[in-house]
Structures are given as structure tokens and as C-alpha cells.
Amino acid sequence: MQVIQFKGVRLWLLLMLGSLLAGCGINNIPNYDEQVKAAWAQVQNQYQRRADLIPNLVETVKGYARQEQETLTAVIEARAKATSIQVDASTLDDPQKLQQFQQAQSQLTGALSRLMVVSERYPDLKSNQNFLALQSQLEGTENRIAVARKDFIAAVQRYNTEIRTFPGRLWHSVMYSDLPIRENFEATSADAEKAPEVKF
């Protein structure tokens, strides 16, 4: 009878310990890590959406502005470079890889901006329905990229805060020491910290 009671007490203690551990944040770190990975996947998804729109946009502009070959070539090359650098969940912790990815995307953004400036010189192009639809989709995608990056930044901040504060710091050192501090997006354009100069 005593053996049965001892097993019952042990089982009860294990259940209590398990419920205490579950309630004290032991699962927060892997949950937040997965949220970071999911948020990054959404960032990649939106950048890919933008990359998929570019060939049609370039072809449409090419039909109206053949003499703008240099700008069109710059967009195509920037797209090729941006799509060649992949950062997935396994390389997300590599700051150099993340910086390369960000720089390639910034170059593509710059090339697309120049393409939009070029389009202003061609009234027929600006009124082309296909161009207008592509331009609208591109603007929407840029907004989605901004939202996806914001969500990624928030997920990284939540994750990094969890592993740097108590009790997450304790759980990180004991159980999840293989999960590193995550890198975040930074302004990557030259002189990004300076306000642009406006001249009239």
C-alpha cells in the first residue's frame, strides 16, 4: 500500500513540476524563434513577389523607352543579384549574409526608383494600362515589404528580449544555448543616418 502511495505522490509531484515549468516561460524561446523564422519567410515572400513583377515591368517600359537601355539593364542586373542571395532559416543567424541580402535588395529598390523616374519622361508609357497595373502592384508590394520587415523586426525584438531577460535568460542558458541572438534589419543605404538634402 505504501509503494502505491509513493508512486502516486511521485506522479503528483511530476505533474506539478511540469505545470509549473509550462507556466514559467520554458516554451517561450522556441515559440519566439519559430515566429522569427515565420516572419522572415514572409519578408522573403514579399521580396520574391517584387522580383516576379519586374520582368513584366521592364518589358512594358522597353516597348516605349528603348533608348533607356542602361536603366533597364541596371534593373535586370539588380534583380538577378537580389534573387541570387538567399537567406533562409539556417543562414538567418549569419550577419554578413543578412547584410548582403539587404544590400542587394536596396540596390534593386534604387534601380526600380530610377526606372520610375525614367517612366515620367514618356507620357504614352504613363498612360499604358499594363504599366499602370504593374506600377500599382509594385507599390502595393513595396508596402507589403515594409509591413513584413516591421513584423520581422518585432519578432526578433521579442525573441532577443526573451533570451536576455529573466526567466528566459535562465532557460536559454540551460536548455536553448544553441539558439543565438538574432540579427535585425538595419538601414543599409549610404549615409542612411543623414537627412536628405533638398535644394530649390
Image: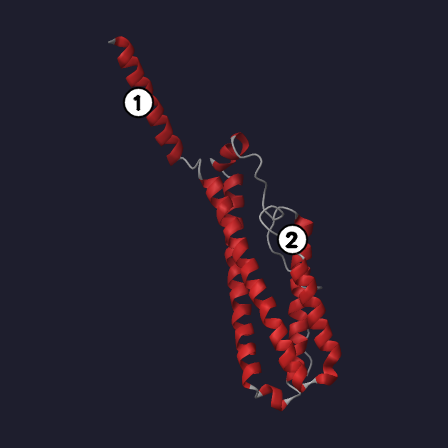
- Tell me which amino acid carries mark 1: Trp
Q: Is residue 195 visible?
A: no
Callout 2: 10 Å neighbours few (<14), some, many (20+)?
A: many
**View extreme (left): residue:** 1
Q: Are marks 2 and 1 in contact (CB under 8 Å)?
A: no
Q: What is the quadrant of the C terminus in the image?
A: bottom right
N-terminal of the pair, mark 2 or mark 1, is 1
Q: Left or right of 20: which side holds 58? A: right
Colour theme:
secondary structure
Residue 146 image offset from top left, x and y in percent: 54, 64
Is label 2 in a helix, a strand or a loop?
A: helix
Residue 123 image offset from top left, x and y in percent: 62, 90
The residue at the point 52 percent across, 68 percent down is 143
Q: Is residue 146 visible?
A: yes
The residue at the point 56 percent across, 66 percent down is 49
The correct choice, above or below, for 19 with respect to 110 in the image is above
Is label 1 in a helix, a strand or a loop?
A: helix
Residue 98 image offset from top left, x and y in percent: 65, 53
Q: Left or right of 15: which side holds 181? A: right
Q: Which is more toward the observer, 74 or 25?
A: 74
The correct choice, above or below, for 154 with respect to 4 in the image is below
Q: Which is more toward the observer, 9 or 59?
A: 59
**View extreme (top): residue:** 2
Image quadrant where residue 119 sits: bottom right
Residue 21 image offset from top left, x and y in percent: 40, 31
Residue identified by numbered label 1: 12
Q: Which is more toward the observer, 24 or 139?
A: 139
Q: CA distance from mark 2 to mark 1?
A: 48 Å
- Tell me which amino acid carries mark 2: Leu
Residue identified by numbered label 2: 98
